[in-house]
Image (cartoon, rainbow, N blue to C red):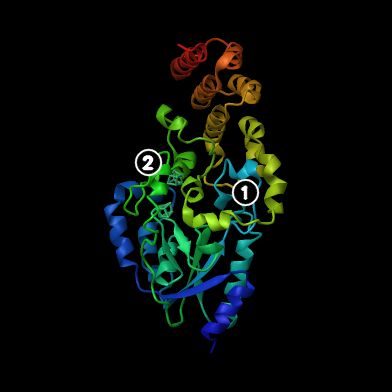
Amino acid sequence: MVQKKDIIKAAKEAGFEDVGFTTARPFEDHAKLLATMEDEYAWTNDVGLDLHNGVDPRTILPEAKTIIVLMETYFLKSYPKTMESHFGRCYLDDDRVTKDGLYLRIKKFRSFLRDNGIDSKVPFNLPHRVAAARAGMGGFGKNCLFYSNKVVRGGSWTLPIAVVIDKEFTPGTPTIGINCPDWCKNTCIAACPTRALKGNGRIDPRKCISYLTYFGEGITPKELREPMGLYIYGCDRCQNVCPRNQPWLAKELPINDKVVAKAKDFDLCLLLHMDKNYFNAKIWPHMFYMSDKNLWRWKMNVARVMGNSLDPFYLPDLVRAFNENSDERVKAMIAWAMGHIGGEYGLSALKKIKPGATGLVKEELEDAMKVCAGI
Ligand code: SF4
Ligand code: SF4
C-alpha cells in the first residue's frame, strides 16, 4: 500500500514544492460564510462556478476520504514589465486552455495515484485555499489571499490545488486564520483602489478590479476609471503592497521565456484594434474569462488603460479605434481616454473624431473637450 511519503515524493517529482493532507469532511464554516454572502457571490452561478456544491468533497467523489493539496506557485519566474503592469500575474502563464504546463504536472501526479489504486478528482469549485489552510500549509492575509508557510518566502503567489482521493491518510494540523503582523496597518485595505476589501478578512468580489475587468457590466463608471488604473485583466495591487510579499519581490528571478514570447501579442495597440480571429488565436487561449462576444470589454479596458497611461503616443490609435468601432461603450471610453491624456495633443486628437456622435458618446466627447480646454 502506498505511503504518505511516496505521495509526497511523487508530488515533488511533478514539480510541487509543498504538499499537504486534510480530511474530506465538508467545509462547514465556508458554507456558512457563503450563505452570508449570497449577493456578493450570485455572479458565480452565472459563470458556472457552483461554489455551494464545492463545500462537500463527497458531492465530487462519493468515496472521498482525503484531500491532498499541491502547492503551485505561479511566480517562480519573472514577467516582462509590459505584461505585469496590465495583467494579474496569475493569468500570465495560465494553461487551463492550452494544457501545456501545470495541467501536465497534475496529470502526472494523478497517474501515480491511479497506478497505486487511488481514485482522484480535481474539483474546480472546492475552496482550495481553505483546504490548504486546513492541511496546515499556511494562512490568510487581510487581502483574502492565501500565504504559504513554506514556498515563495511566505508570500501569496500561490495556487493551492485540491486533489480529492478515496484513501485515508493522516491529516495535517490546521492553520486556518488571518496571520498578518500587527505592525502592518492594513496596507492592502488602504491600497485597494476600489474599496473591495472590507477589513474583516472579507472581500466584495463585485468591487474588485479583477472582477470588474472581466465581468463588469456596461461602461466602467467614471468614478472607477482612474482607480482601476493600468489593469486590463486582473489586479495584483493588494499583493504588491503587502509587506509579507516583499521578500519574494526582492528576489532576482529568471525571466519566464514563455510569457516573453507572447508579450508582443498583448501590445496595447494590437489589443485595441483586434478582431475576433486575432482574439481567438492569440489572446483567448491565455485569458479566457471573456469570450469573443465580449471583445467590447477588452477594448474598453484597453482604452481606459491608454487614458490612464497619460501617454500621447496612444492618441492616433485611439482616434482610429473610435472611427472603426461601433460599440458605444468602447467609443465613449476612447473619448474619456483622449480627454484624460488631455492638453493640446488630446484636444487635437478629439478634433479628428468624425462628427455625428449621439447619446453617451456625445456626452463623453463633450466632457473630454472640456477637460482638454481646462474648463
Ligand atoms: S486585487 Fe486589486 S481591486 Fe481586488 S482587492 Fe486587491 S487591490 Fe483591491
Ligand atoms: S498588507 Fe498587511 S494587512 Fe494586508 S495582507 Fe499584507 S500584511 Fe496583511
Residue 76: percent from the left, percent from the top? 62, 59
Q: Residue reaching furthest front? A: 183
Q: Which residue in the structure is indicated by mark 2?
A: 195
* Position of 233 relative to 175 (above/below): above
Residue 187: percent from the left, percent from the top? 41, 48
User: Quick one: SS at disc 1?
Assistant: loop
Instruction: Choose between 96 and 36: the one closer to the eye.
Output: 36
Amino acid type of the residue that numbered disc 1 sits on in the rendered structure: Pro
Label 2 residue near ligand 1, CB within 8 Å: yes
Left or right? Give the position of 351 relative to 237: right
**Contact? badges 1 and 2 (CB < 8 Å):** no
Instruction: Choose between 249 and 35: the one closer to the eye.
Output: 249
- Determine the residue positioned at 45% across, 34% down: 227
Left or right? Give the position of 223 relative to 357: left
Dividing the picture into quadrants, the one containing residue 63 is: bottom left
Q: Nearer the viewer, mark 1 or mark 2?
A: 2
Q: Which mark is residue 132?
A: none
Q: Is residue 280 visible?
A: no
Other residues around mark 2 within 10 Å, as few (<14) / some (14–19) / many (≥20): some
Image quarter (top left, top right, bottom left or bottom right) of the C terminus: top left
Amino acid type of the residue that numbered disc 2 sits on in the rendered structure: Arg
Left or right? Give the position of 361 relative to 186: right
Q: Which mark is residue 285?
A: 1
- Determine the residue positioned at 54% across, 47% down: 88
Residue 316: percent from the left, percent from the top? 65, 21
- Determine the residue positioned at 53% across, 54% down: 246
Left or right? Give the position of 61 relative to 18: left
Report, in whole angstroms, how far the alpha carbon at label 1 lies from the one at label 2: 31 Å
Q: Is residue 52 visible?
A: yes
* Position of 134 relative to 277 (above/below): below
User: Quick one: SS at disc 2?
Assistant: loop
Residue 372: percent from the left, percent from the top? 52, 14
